[in-house]
Amino acid sequence: MAYTTKYYAKTGTQMVHTDLSDALWSIVRWLVNDQTSTSTSASSQDAASSTGPAGPGWMLVAARSNSSLFTTRATATITTIAAASINDAEWFYINDGTDTIYYEFDKDNSITPGRVRVDISGDTTADDVRDTIISVINTRGSLSRIAASNGGSATVDLLNRQPGTDGNQTNGHNVGGAFNITNSTGGAQGDGNGTMAGITGATNWRDGSIAVGATDWCVLRSDRRTALGQSAQATGRITPSTSGTTSVTIDIGSQTLTGVAATRTSGWDDFDYRVTPLSSLCDEIVAALNDTNNNFTALGRAVDGSTYVDFELNPANYFGRLGNLVKFALGGTNSYSITPNDGTFASGVTTEDVQLYLKMATPSGTPDEFEHLIMPFDDFVGDNNNTPTFPSTAIGDALQNPVDSTTGLNVGVWIGVADEGMASLISDGGSVEAAGWLYWGDLDAPLPSDSRPFVIWDRADFCRITDASLTQYWNRLSPADDTTFIVGTLVTLYSGSPNASVTRENTGDHLLNRLGEQPILPVGVYFATTNHRHMAGFLRNVYMIGNTSAGVRGTLGSMSYAYRMDNNVGADGIQPVVLKWDGLTKY
Amino acid sequence: MGMNTPTGNVKLYNRISHTSTAVFLVDFVAFLIDDEGSSFITGLNKSWLTTNGGTGGSTWKMVEAYSSAASTNRQTPPTTSGNNALDSFTGTGFSWKTGSLLAGDWIVLECGGTNPFHIYIELNSTTQIGYKFMPLGDFSTGGSAVSPPVSPNGFSATAIPGGGSSSSLNAQTGYTSTVYYTGDAADRFFSFHINLATFMYIGETNQGASADTRPYVMYTDSDNLRWDMITASQWSRLSPVDNATELTAGSNVQMFNVADLGNRVHYGDVIDATGEFRILPVGVFFDDTNHNHFAGWLVGVGSAPRDGVLSVTSGTANQADRGDDTGDGIGPNSGGEENFIFTSDLNTAPGVMHFWDGSSTFP
């Protein structure tokens, strides 16, 4: 699994826009990998879009214009009933277009391996069951594409967060009475391959004639799940043996289950390894691991596979790749085996997606600009208003407030790079200062618990990497609490004597590598806010180089990188923004 | 980012205790050249680890060795296949064959590939090892049996440190009796530390300039097992500009918060608010006039934060360690967090991080 990189250029030809509205339409078309739609209102270049690699990209969630809202996500509904009317082990399933996940109602602390437990042993009313289902689906989060919410009395609303007709699927159940789950319907456009021409109702977006200022906006969604794989819990399997055992220990996290030649004692973290046959031994281990008086239930739950025991980590504490860090080891002298056997649980994946809101605006007293905002929780609901209601965790220049106050974007040459998780563009108006920079989306190398490492650059008018305070415009939602808006800075590289940036000097002596080439250096993003301090990761496809005598724009490495900065050569503390580039197009 | 990720296989020198510097040195050479067959090694209780699907030593081989006690005391391995077997040396009492080194005994190793380099390693004394690094791979064999070798059969003019044929070596101390050695090696580098107090790194860097065809560096401040704020003259190399000038004023490159340039990312009083810390790559920079350049990132070695984990000076960690030892399986020293080891000789400075095997206890 890996990202697919694409560039905002036609092969060998720069993108030149004479109108920012047309630029925005063309960029959206590029992001959604639309290779065919044409604008009916713009000049030929403005109507063009990159011919970069086809394939997954960002996806259109909603487009609004002409007082019409076009949406692309499938929905379904569950009608619940009282818990007493549901039998233990009855189930329902949801097909999200990728996986069909079975959810099994559980009243006796036992479920079928491979199914997701819906523990209704403490529920009474239909609304109790509704709330339990919502909790289970959402706690397992991006293990599926489905988001659940309260749809009113005895009703669960299901939303396939991934746009597209793939979401239109058959769901089912074997529960009696009035319990029901509808099929998923309403998905529109193909995953990652929507077309502007396929938009209905919102004709300005369809035709490439979006208006400035008031009413026309769209929401896109990243497609990290296609690039990285859908989220999955880390796995661990114990295969016991009834022979050859003189001692056995199984480490899960910091806890150790010890096999003893005696009857198991609740609260002692042990089991009787003498038990036979194998299926009974598995029962014995499952009972020990699931004994609430022992120390494993906070870590997860054992599931009996008859000839083996699977241990399912608690997703509330060890969701996705966090589970890969949990110790899983076998000790003693025995014929047991575990999978994986390299010391930890494995194969956990955490993949969340981010949404991007874009609109042409005319901020007071400024020229036309893009208005933009990201939604890290992928939770845009959508309404048919001139400005939609944003989720409480939407990030612009403040919570729920789009970035719209800058004047950095220009008509002229546009270059850009994007993949399924990020997009960054530079507008070049020609003069030294007329350069704007945009960055939306995720970072490379986030920490395991930081499942939504999404940032937005809040100063489109600064097209530079600098160590001045002007860099404090990296905005994100704090991973410490998932609610706090925080502002971060760049991370720069210092070394040498006297203290000197690897890239920052007036003299140029540090800057141009004496081999005659510039080192392409990473750009980190750091948040120093009290109680939210963290190094979030590195910009992807965006780098820095030394302040160069080569000019404010150009290409490097046989056009594998393109750079631009909005200040004169030699200015103190300013380095160009470097985008990964297509290797073909002169800039 | 993969900046410090080895591109080849890595093997680990797994906290092995030796009773003398001499014993360590012959064992470490065997580790580098992947000598698992020579007869003396069994007696040395060889216990280095191989990980990532390979031994990582196939490109390390012997060029020439000197044994002061032997009758034939300067030898090249007799055959190509013998380049990776200390047993292949001949004669009575050749110390690299018997495993009984004396002060002054030396060996030259080659790390192969497109542009091989040579490393001269000498047992200086019972507590010291000396190194000389030949980035051009041009050690000349076959001369007088002396220690150190002399021109014309010895060092090239570009050998570092010291240059020329002088006896100047990068002397590494700390080798007292019965100490622990831990390190890692791959096809193009090795690093290790002694008793949690001494650090050595020789070999390539990642992601330097493409024109830098021999991006090889050597740490020359080996008594300093930590990442200091800013210290020049910790790294040496041959200038890639002319492949002739010896540069000795290299310094480590660390990551700084640009809004607070007095502080490195890894020098705060708290760990990340996420409860985690990040292992960061460490680069090497040379500020010499007409030779200034960023030499790339160290391989297999990085920086661990001062706090959280470094409330102690050594241990094992994962990048997501919470630093709290809460028993949740992802705190230091509580299990499942042995993908890196870190050491520092000062618990107020970021520590030196090595990749680790994911399961072994350290320290």
Image (spheres, helix red, strand yellow):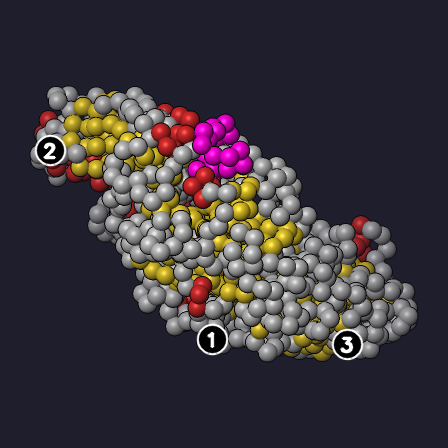
The front one of B63 and A76 is A76
Q: Residue at x 65, y 45 (%)?
A: A586
- Of the two numbered discs 1 and 3 in the rendering, the one whose residue sits closer to the viewer: 1
Determine the chain carrying the residue at label 1.
B
Amino acid tagged 3: Gly
Q: Which residues are magenta?
A: A25-46
The front one of A142 and B73 is A142
SS assignment at label 2: loop
Q: Residues within 10 Å of mark 3 (few under 14, many from 20)?
A: some
Indicate the position of residue A25 as horizontal and vertical percent values: 44, 37
Please give left or right for residue B32 compared with residue A8 in the image.
Answer: right
Amino acid tagged 2: Ser
Q: Residue at x 10, y 26 (%)?
A: A85
Distance from Cα at disc 1 to Cα at disc 2: 57 Å
In the image, is residue A43 part of the stretch drawn in magenta?
yes
The residue tagged 1 is B262
The front one of B253 and B169 is B253
Distance from Cα at disc 1 to Cα at disc 3: 34 Å
Amino acid tagged 1: Gly
Q: Is residue A322 above or below residue A303?
A: below
Indicate the position of residue A453 as horizontal and vertical percent values: 40, 51
The residue tagged 2 is A153
The residue tagged 3 is B162
SS assignment at label 1: loop
Find residue A337 and report its image quarter: top left
Q: Is residue B84 above or below residue A64?
A: below
